[in-house]
């Protein structure tokens, strides 16, 4: 059995492994967080604690799922706000968690409505024994515009509230960013200017996941009406990875400490977030589907990956992929890679023909008698859509050809990937 050290330091705090619950229903009380620790999570971000004067009043039902061809939870919509327990109950839970699990990391997520709230909450969770603070500047379903993602899209408020938290606490602090913004860099820089030590991203994406077609109401239906609210799960992973990559390559942010969030369900997801610059990882929707034990699979997979890569320290992987992500205008456009069809593997389903004819460049021809496709190289642009849709791997990458008038060595062209059949 492979046993690699998954320990990693983040904002000066040592985590036994990078896996944390994200602030959400999965870390809503002592008992839930304690069970997560027992199952092997390195840390928990306790569900966001608000000021005593803000009364949480939740709706019912509050969840919806996006499915795809029978697969549930491709995406997940929630309308839940911050912790519904009293401020004192939440503070007591933080204290007891740290008392009973001294080597685990307890992160207090907080959210205020004004500067003094942020100061007071920061002081309260510090006194309760939290190891770190996460500022929730990004929840998209708060019922007050003084809170949540409306704040996170305003760099001036982000800076002001980060400074307020630093006045209330000397704990390491990360600001949790909203993806409901075109460019996250200004908000992240404002957070750092206000005193944040790092960034957590992404929170959920504003969404309408489904409509009830008969009632003509967005789901979930709350007494006949629906609302825009946060979307999470596997479907938001590409959005999260994009924001993390853009943060880590922005001028002045190349070493930005990031806690990555957004659709992490497997060890492969975890590695992707680490390679693009995340040091710790936060999970909710995967836990809501499969329970806390998914951390075992993620830890084992990550250790095997480290072994394969010859890496002894997890920190050595952080951000390694960013050097290979270029602006679109800098990508090599001098060649085409054509598909190659293996008729011995082909089952004659015609998916490549239909997809190419209706959705690409009509470069696959179809023989009705033999039910076999062929490639019309005069039309093929090398997009490889046929390769991706083939259900049996009968289409692979074929010959590589330089475009007319272009220079280069086809032997040097690297298009190997885990998605395309070769």
Image (cartoon, grey):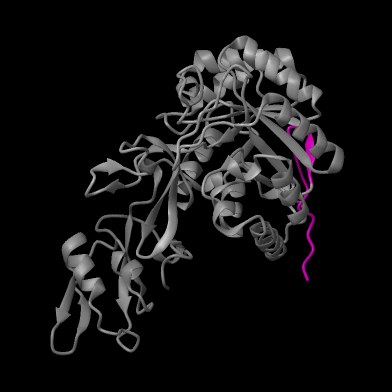
Farthest-out residue, left: 368
Q: Is residue 320 visible?
A: no
Q: Residue 259 appears at what percent x and percent y?
A: 63, 39
**In this picture, residue 22 sits left or right of residue 104:** left
**In this picture, residue 406 sits left or right of residue 414:** left
Quadrant assignment, res 53: top right
Q: Residue 124 appears at what percent x and percent y?
A: 74, 20
For residue 227, above or below residue 121: below
The structure residue drawn at horizontal position 49% and vertical position 42%, both measured from the top left corner, is 240
SS majority, magenta? loop
Query: What is the magenta range?
Result: 1-15
The structure residue drawn at horizontal position 30% and vertical position 38%, both measured from the top left corner, is 224
Question: In front here: 159 or 376?
Answer: 159
Question: In front here: 195 or 379?
Answer: 195
Quarter of the picture containing the N terminus is bottom right
Quarter of the picture containing the C terminus is bottom left
């Amino acid at each position: 059995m492979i046993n690699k050290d998954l320990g990693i330091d983040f904002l000066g705090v040592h985590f036994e492994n990078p896996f944390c619950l994200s602030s959400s229903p999965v870390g809503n009380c002592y008992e839930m967080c304690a069970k997560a620790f027992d199952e092997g999570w390195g840390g928990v971000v306790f569900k966001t604690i608000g000021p005593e004067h803000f009364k949480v009043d939740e709706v019912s039902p509050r969840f919806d799922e996006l499915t795809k061809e029978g697969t549930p939870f491709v995406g997940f919509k929630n309308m839940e706000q911050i912790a519904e327990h009293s401020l004192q109950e939440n503070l007591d839970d933080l204290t007891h968690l740290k008392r009973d699990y001294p080597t685990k990391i307890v992160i207090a997520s907080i959210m205020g409505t004004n500067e003094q709230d942020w100061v007071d909450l920061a002081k309260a969770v510090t006194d309760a024994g939290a190891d770190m603070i996460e500022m929730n500047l990004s929840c998209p379903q708060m019922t007050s515009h003084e809170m949540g993602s409306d704040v996170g899209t305003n760099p001036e408020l982000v800076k002001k509230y980060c400074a307020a938290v630093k006045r209330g606490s000397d704990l390491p602090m990360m600001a949790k960013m909203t993806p409901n913004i075109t460019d996250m860099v200004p908000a992240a820089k404002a957070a750092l200017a206000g005193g944040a030590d790092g960034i957590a991203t992404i929170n959920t994406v504003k969404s309408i996941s489904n409509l009830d077609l008969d009632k003509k109401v967005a789901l979930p239906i709350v007494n006949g009406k629906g609302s825009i609210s946060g979307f999470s799960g596997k479907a938001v992973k590409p959005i999260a990875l994009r924001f993390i990559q853009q943060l880590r390559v922005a001028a002045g942010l190349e070493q930005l400490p990031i806690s990555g969030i957004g659709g992490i369900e497997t060890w492969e997801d975890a590695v992707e977030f680490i390679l693009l610059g995340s040091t710790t990882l936060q999970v909710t929707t995967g836990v809501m589907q499969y329970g806390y034990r998914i951390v075992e699979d993620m830890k084992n997979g990550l250790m095997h990956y480290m072994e394969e890569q010859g890496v002894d320290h997890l920190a050595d992987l952080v951000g390694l992929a960013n050097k290979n992500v270029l602006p679109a205008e800098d990508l090599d456009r001098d060649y085409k890679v054509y598909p190659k069809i293996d008729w011995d593997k082909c089952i004659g389903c015609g998916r490549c023909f239909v997809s190419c004819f209706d959705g690409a460049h009509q470069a696959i021809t179809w023989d009705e008698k033999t039910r076999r496709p062929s490639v019309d190289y005069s039309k093929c642009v090398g997009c490889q859509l046929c390769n991706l849709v083939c259900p049996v791997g009968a289409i692979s990458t074929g010959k590589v050809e330089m475009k007319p008038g272009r220079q280069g060595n086809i032997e040097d062209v690297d298009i190997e990937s885990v998605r395309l059949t070769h």
